[in-house]
Image (cartoon, coloured by chain):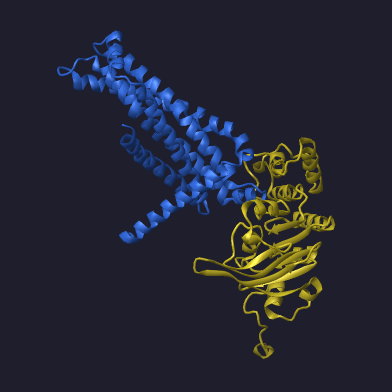
């Protein structure tokens, strides 16, 4: 039998307070540069650079589908050069950041939660503390910072590749030339389209990494406990992306 | 000196410690014995501030551990080595990197770090394993690396959590020798175990934890000669009720 609504709400409130507490601890640990500084580059490579292939793979197919879909919608109603506008706007402002964020929530969030969760249940996190390291400075801050810095970089590549894929599709499969595609792309382009997407993706990176660390540090004993934490980290990361996506749309648009 | 002062700690509805009081004198090995799940490991974690007591206090050199701020707690942990039951080596690091981590935190230069790694591995009789990963070592070797990681920091105190559990008799004896040698170097030890052979071999004093409190403390000779039925049953490893059965039942 599922728990009563009141207790589920209380549990959710407790979780929000828990996330807040952990976020504060992480913010306080930022001052311990000597601990997290040397670890940052390695995490940026692991969480960011190694994620580029999956992000580009998604971007290519997103660009292709968007191009074909917009042509299907516009034919007979809107001039076809609007394909460029729709592909550009959608990839830069929404699908680039969100789909990349979702993919990285799976890859990065799961990897962080599984790694830290395993460390937790094998007492490696306790061992770290007994060696006088702060768990937030050593484990959380470098991962959250790396993801915050690298998600926009990966997303920028995904945006470029997504628009490129849409362009290649338009000139090869649709009755559209390069100048027409570029005309649509330029006509509605604003610089905000890019920074809006990149700001969003930075916040997605912070949220995904924080959820991964949080769930990892909360892992209960055993393989099943680590598995559960990993699943929860991915689910929470995806939920956080959708909530932040709506938040930025309200605040910045 | 470490002083456990009426320590109480519960996990959910389970009250694990119910007022543990124990003195761990400097320069000696104090052994805490007790059944599995009696709260021995919890006591060690309370000493280094990994968990906080519900009531009572741990005093290390007079300072109350759970009242320390993070900086002070980090300083305290710099004086205490901790040998975990399953070694808790960082599996993504080599043996040398495992030992190096604590030394780097204390700001030692590279020369000192290299010398300490070599020295501590020599003490645990594991030269030449610096570049191996924990997964490439046996259980006994991992535990010895755990000790090397602790002693490399030259701590004043070392806490050993079940150091001989799961080891073969020869490796257990090697671990016992290590704990005695470390004590002879002037390091105060608190050893948690239910291996009585090891307890009597390494201990200067033995304390038995039973039902959340210290049942008896004494020298090895005093514990071996005890007439407390609970302690006797434990050290003799007798199953059943602690009280000896009346003789007439067998006549």
* Total marks in image: 0
What is the x, y in percent for residue A16? Answer: 41, 51
Counting from the top left corner in percent of width and height, residue A226 is at 50, 48
Q: Colour of chain B?
A: yellow
Is A65 placed left or right of B9 in the picture?
Answer: left
Quarter of the picture containing the N terminus of chain A is bottom left
B139 versus B5 height, above or below: above
Which percent across, then down, holds residue A181? 29, 13
Would residue A235 be found to the left or right of residue B63 on screen?
left
Relative depth, front residue between B178 and B196: B178
Q: Residue furthest right?
A: B184
In the figure, residue B196 lies in which quadrant?
A: bottom right
Q: Position of residue B203 (x, y in %)?
A: 78, 65
**Is B226 displayed left or right of B212 in the figure?**
right
The blue one among the chains is: A
Q: Quadrant of residue A162?
A: top left
Taking the image as drawn, is residue B209 in sight?
A: yes
Please state, as top left, top right, bottom left or bottom right, where the C terminus of chain A lies in the image.
top left
Residue B164 seen by the camera: no
Compare residues B142 and B96 and report the one nearer the observer: B96
Depth check, front residue: A150 or A122: A150
What's the residue at 45%, 31% (across, down)?
A: A151
Q: Residue furthest left?
A: A76
């Amino acid at each position: 039998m599922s728990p009563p609504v009141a207790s589920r709400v209380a549990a959710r409130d407790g979780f929000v307070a828990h996330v807040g507490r952990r976020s504060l601890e992480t913010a306080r640990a930022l001052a311990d540069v000597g601990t997290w500084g040397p670890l940052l580059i390695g995490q940026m490579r692991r969480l960011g650079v190694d994620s580029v292939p999956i992000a580009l793979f998604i971007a290519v197919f997103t660009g292709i589908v968007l191009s074909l879909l917009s042509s299907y919608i516009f034919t007979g109603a809107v001039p076809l050069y609007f394909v460029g506008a729709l592909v550009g706007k959608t990839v830069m402002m929404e699908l680039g950041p969100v789909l990349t964020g979702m993919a990285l929530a799976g890859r990065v969030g799961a990897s962080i939660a599984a790694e830290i969760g395993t460390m937790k249940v094998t007492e490696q996190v306790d061992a770290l503390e007994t060696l006088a390291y702060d768990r937030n400075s050593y484990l959380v801050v470098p991962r959250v910072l790396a993801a915050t810095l690298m998600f926009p970089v990966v997303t920028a590549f995904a945006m470029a590749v997504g628009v490129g894929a849409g362009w290649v599709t338009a000139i090869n499969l649709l009755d559209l030339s390069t100048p027409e595609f570029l005309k649509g792309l330029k006509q509605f382009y604003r610089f905000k389209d890019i920074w809006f997407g990149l700001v969003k993706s930075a916040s997605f990176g912070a949220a995904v990494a924080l959820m991964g660390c949080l769930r990892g540090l909360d892992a209960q004993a055993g393989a099943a406990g680590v598995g559960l934490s990993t699943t929860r980290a991915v689910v929470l990361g995806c939920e956080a992306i959708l909530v932040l996506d709506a938040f930025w749309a309200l605040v910045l648009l | 000196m470490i002083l456990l002062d009426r320590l109480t700690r519960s996990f959910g509805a389970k009250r694990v410690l119910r007022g543990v009081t124990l003195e761990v004198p400097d320069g000696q090995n104090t052994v805490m014995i007790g059944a599995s799940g009696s709260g021995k490991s919890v006591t060690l974690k309370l000493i280094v501030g990994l968990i906080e007591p519900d009531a009572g206090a741990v005093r290390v050199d007079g300072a109350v551990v759970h009242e320390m701020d993070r900086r002070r707690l980090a300083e305290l942990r710099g004086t205490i080595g901790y040998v975990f039951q399953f070694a808790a080596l960082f599996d993504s690091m080599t043996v040398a990197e495992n030992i190096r981590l604590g030394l780097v935190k204390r700001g030692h230069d590279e020369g000192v770090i290299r010398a300490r790694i070599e020295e501590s591995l020599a003490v645990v009789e594991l030269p030449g394993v610096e570049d191996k990963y924990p997964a490439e070592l046996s259980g006994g070797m991992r535990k010895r690396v755990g000790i090397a990681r602790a002693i490399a920091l030259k701590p004043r105190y070392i806490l050993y959590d079940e150091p001989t559990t799961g080891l073969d008799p020869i490796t257990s004896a090697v671990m016992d020798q290590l704990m005695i040698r470390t004590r002879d170097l002037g390091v105060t030890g608190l050893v948690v175990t239910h291996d009585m052979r090891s307890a009597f071999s390494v201990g200067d004093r033995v304390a038995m934890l039973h039902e959340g409190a210290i049942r008896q403390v004494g020298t090895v000779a005093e514990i071996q000669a005890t007439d407390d039925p609970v302690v006797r049953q434990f050290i003799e490893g007798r199953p059943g009720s602690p009280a000896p059965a009346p003789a007439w039942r067998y006549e």
